[in-house]
Image (tube, rainbow, N blue to C red):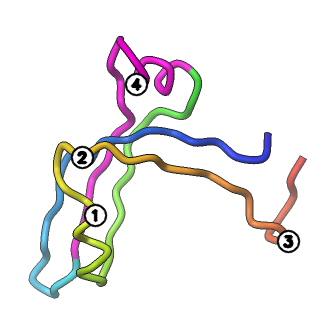
Amino acid sequence: MEQVKAKFICDKKTERPDNAFEVELSAVADSEGENEQYFKYTPYGKLTMGTINPEAAKLFVPGQELYLVFIPVVGSGRID
């Protein structure tokens, strides 16, 4: 498999005192439509990450669904 595309939802975005942003995402878990297929066939879980780029932070709005694509970096380690 060359890549895996998962679907997550933004649960929370927090602006920190140092002007950085922290976002919390979780995998969609609906039992109908496209989300059912993503939950059934792709990774599930939670992701917390941050950014110091205000423009990038605009992408993350609580309730917004987002695609997350995992692609191996060539030359960074073993890929079977």
Mark with earlier residue (4, 1):
4
Tell me what residue is drawn at x 38 percent, y 41 percent. 8
The quarter of the image holding the N terminus is top right
- Distance (Cα) linking label 2 and label 1: 9 Å
- Distance (Cα) linking label 1 and label 3: 30 Å
Q: Nearer the viewer, residue 74 or 76?
A: 74
Tell me what residue is drawn at x 32 percent, y 19 percent. 30
Q: Secondary structure at mark 3?
A: loop
Residue at the spot of label 4 = 35
- Return the x and y of residue 74 as percentages of the image width and height: 82, 67
Mark with earlier residue (1, 3):
1
- Distance (Cα) linking label 3 and label 4: 33 Å
Residue at the spot of label 3 = 75
Q: Please indicate whether residue 37 sits to the left or right of residue 29 in the image.
A: right
Mark with earlier residue (2, 1):
1
For the record, the magenta segment spans 21-40
Q: Amino acid at mark 2?
A: Gln
Pointers 2 and 1 in contact (C-beta within 8 Å): yes
From the viewer's perspective, is the residue at label 3 or at label 2 nearer?
2
Mark with earlier residue (2, 4):
4
Q: Amino acid at mark 1?
A: Leu
- Distance (Cα) linking label 4 and label 1: 20 Å
Q: Secondary structure at mark 4?
A: helix
Residue at the spot of label 2 = 64
Residue at the spot of label 1 = 59
Q: Residues within 10 Å of mark 2 (few under 14, many from 20)?
A: few
Q: Is residue 47 magenta?
A: no
**Position above or below: 50 against 62:** below
Q: Residues within 10 Å of mark 1 (few under 14, many from 20)?
A: few
- Report which quarter residue 75 is drawn in: bottom right
